[in-house]
Image (cartoon, coloured by chain):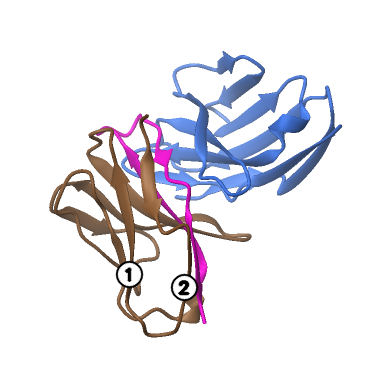
Amino acid sequence: QQQVKQSPQSLIVQKGGISIINCAYENTAFDYFPWYQQFPGKGPALLIAIRPDVSEKKEGRFTISFNKSAKQFSLHIMDSQPGDSATYFCAASWSKIIFGKGTRLHILP
Amino acid sequence: EAQVTQNPRYLITVTGKKLTVTCSQNMNHEYMSWYRQDPGLGLRQIYYSMNVEVTDKGDVPEGYKVSRKEKRNFPLILESPSPNQTSLYFCASRKDGINYGYTFGSGTRLTVV
């Protein structure tokens, strides 16, 4: 019940394409859903986050789509660039934060 | 610059030799936490602290100790390291309240031989 299931484990996308990473959760007490981006040799960095009272949040090329009834949320990266190649973690929190296992994204130049 | 600073970045040690990984934040954050990152397992919480002198176990606390004597510092102590503690460790902090994102340090890669 406390898990956050993230898919896919790895993803390869052509430059200019749309990258989509999905997460699902069970615990309806979660009320904050952040995404983190991690480059090799660095710590994860907060990318974008959403609360469950909205269905979508957009910041530049990054969009979170949130489906409360399905208990799913996803990260969309529009016009994907080689510089977006990184590992992405979704997370969900209420009194504590639970991370997904990560998606390694590679954008082909 | 707002940041979480961990030291050292890399450490190779031998089984049983006590070590401390330091963590310091300059954002006056109440909440601090330690994670380990292993391939295929993602980020797993070791210990966390909600404020000075308040610490609690995360999901994988065995073999680790922490202390929070000052708000800015949250050291991770391995009293008797073992090879299964070889991992990438991250310290993180955030403001009080759950709806704030973490700021992570740059990581400490620990190898126990």
Q: Which chain is brown?
A: B
Q: Is B41 on the left-hand or right-hand side of B102?
A: right
From the viewer's side, name the closer residue of B103 and A67. B103
Residue segment shown in magenta: B86-113
The tag earlier along the polypeptide, 1 or 2, is: 1
The crowd level at tag 2 (other Cα within 10 Å; few <14, some 14-19, many 20+) is: many
Write the residue at 45% across / 50% down. A2
Residue under numbered circle 2? B85
x%, y% of residue B74? 26, 53
Q: Is residue B101 left or right of residue A20?
A: left
Give the residue type that dot 2 points to. Answer: Gln
Q: Quadrant of residue A37?
A: top right
The quadrant holding residue A11 is top right
**Badge 1 vs badge 2, beta-carbon distance below 8 Å:** yes
Name the secondary structure under disc 1: loop
Q: Nearer the viewer, residue A101 or A87?
A: A87
Q: Chain of mark 2?
A: B
Chain identifier, colour blue: A
Residue A91 drawn above or below residue B52: above
Numbered disc 2: secondary structure? helix
User: Where does residue B19 sit, x and y in percent of width and height?
Assistant: 34, 72
Q: Which residue is mark 1?
A: B64
Residue A12 is tagged as: none
Instruction: Give how far apart the Cα atoms at labels 1 and 2 are.
Output: 9 Å
Q: Are marks 1 and 2 on the same chain?
A: yes
- Seen from the viewer's position, the closer of residues B90 and A53 is B90
Q: Residue at x 35, y 38 (%)?
A: A94
Q: Is residue B26 left or right of residue B70?
A: right
Is B102 part of what is drawn in magenta? yes
